[in-house]
């Protein structure tokens, strides 16, 4: 399943390079608000902090919107500018919620970890370790937040619940996804975040959830099946046929097929 996931993500990324790059340009412009403006407004700390918070929240709204339109790419479709702007209305509550959660977790990590490590005691080390691993579990679980919102549910409480359910049921995929996306993020630095960038990461996460849901559809239809022996070849047959295979010549000169 992992091999096909990487293959399909790459194919869809390649087929939608222009769309992915445009989404990333929009995110770069959005990220400039919390990164650059607070320093310009340093003469007024309250104003600078306000702009920082608003900018961060808008970035998450932007990512939530991008996740909604990238869902169509995973489903062998496409999207236009109109689709993106129309999706903002549906995406902003989920984006604001995730932004707020991220700010709270970031503030918690910033204050709690130094405090507990500063205690210089076994109790402090234990508490710091508990905080650290709780944050790790939250990170691994919340990576599914936007894809779940795009594909499964608009009730944010249910979205968060499903994030943790999917993580604890698929820890291997979750850890692999974080490592994979860290590599993508590092690669994006050399490409000025145009590719694969945040949009490429969101595309991968949506693909990962979409394919993983095939497992749950199978288990629902076959309640007596062994959860450790999922027939991925059978479940992915239709997607493999749609995705197909390509040579290097097909990638560079697709019009010559």
Image (spheres, grey):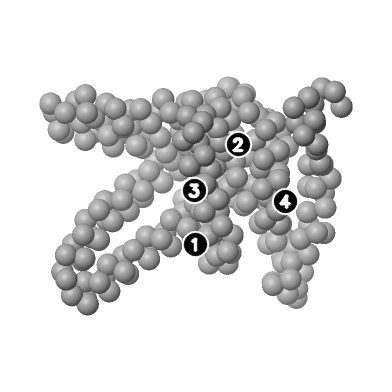
Report the residue marked by disc 1. Answer: 164
Comes first in the chain, label 1 or label 2: 2
Residue 28 sits above or below residue 217 on the image: above
Q: Residue at x 41, y 25 (%)?
A: 29
Report the residue marked by disc 2. Answer: 70
Label 4 element class: helix
> Which quadrant is the C terminus positioned in?
top right
Residue 85 sits above or below residue 57 on the image: above
In 3D space, how far apart are the residues under numbered discs 3 and 4 (Cα atoms)? 19 Å
Residue 232, picture quadrant: bottom right
Evaluate if marks 3 and 2 touch, with contact meaning CB atoms under 8 Å apart: no
In 3D space, how far apart are the residues under numbered discs 3 and 2 (Cα atoms)? 20 Å
Label 3 element class: helix
Q: Residue at x 12, y 26 (%)?
A: 43
Evaluate if marks 1 and 2 touch, with contact meaning CB atoms under 8 Å apart: no
Comes first in the chain, label 1 or label 3: 1
Rendering coords of residue 44 (x, y %): 13, 28
Using a 10 Å C-alpha cutoff, classify the residue at mark 1 as few (fewer than 14 neighbours), some (14 to 19) or many (20 or more): some
Q: Nearer the viewer, residue 182 or 1?
A: 182
In 3D space, how far apart are the residues under numbered discs 1 and 3 (Cα atoms)? 20 Å
Residue 147 sits above or below residue 85 on the image: below
Q: Is residue 2 left or right of residue 161?
A: right
Comes first in the chain, label 1 or label 4: 4
User: Disc 2 or disc 4, which is closer to the eye?
Assistant: 4
Q: Is residue 127 left or right of residue 154?
A: left
Q: Nearer the viewer, residue 247 or 175?
A: 247
Report the residue marked by disc 3. Answer: 182
Rendering coords of residue 52 (x, y %): 27, 34
Report the residue marked by disc 4. Answer: 4
């Amino acid at each position: 399943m992992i091999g096909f996931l990487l293959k399909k993500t790459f194919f869809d990324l390649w087929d939608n390079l222009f769309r992915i790059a445009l989404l990333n340009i929009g995110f770069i412009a959005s990220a400039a608000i919390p990164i650059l403006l607070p320093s310009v407004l340093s003469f007024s700390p309250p104003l600078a902090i306000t702009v920082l918070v608003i900018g961060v929240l808008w970035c998450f709204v932007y990512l939530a919107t991008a996740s909604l339109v990238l869902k169509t790419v995973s489903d062998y479709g496409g999207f236009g500018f109109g689709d993106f702007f129309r999706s903002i209305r549906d995406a902003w509550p989920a984006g604001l919620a995730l932004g707020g959660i991220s700010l709270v977790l970031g503030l918690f990590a910033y204050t709690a970890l130094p405090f507990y490590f500063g205690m210089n005691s076994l109790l402090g080390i234990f508490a710091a370790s508990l905080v650290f691993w709780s944050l790790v579990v939250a990170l691994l679980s919340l990576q599914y937040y936007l894809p779940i919102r795009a594909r499964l549910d608009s009730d944010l409480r249910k979205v968060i619940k499903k994030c943790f359910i999917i993580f604890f049921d698929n820890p291997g995929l979750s850890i692999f996804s974080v490592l994979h996306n860290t590599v993508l993020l590092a690669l994006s630095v050399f490409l000025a975040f145009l590719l694969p960038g945040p949009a490429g990461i969101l595309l991968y996460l949506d693909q990962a959830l979409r394919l993983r849901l095939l497992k749950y559809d199978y288990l629902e239809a076959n309640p007596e099946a062994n959860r450790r022996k999922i027939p991925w070849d059978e479940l992915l047959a239709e997607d493999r046929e749609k995705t197909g295979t390509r040579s290097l010549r097909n990638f560079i000169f697709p019009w010559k097929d």
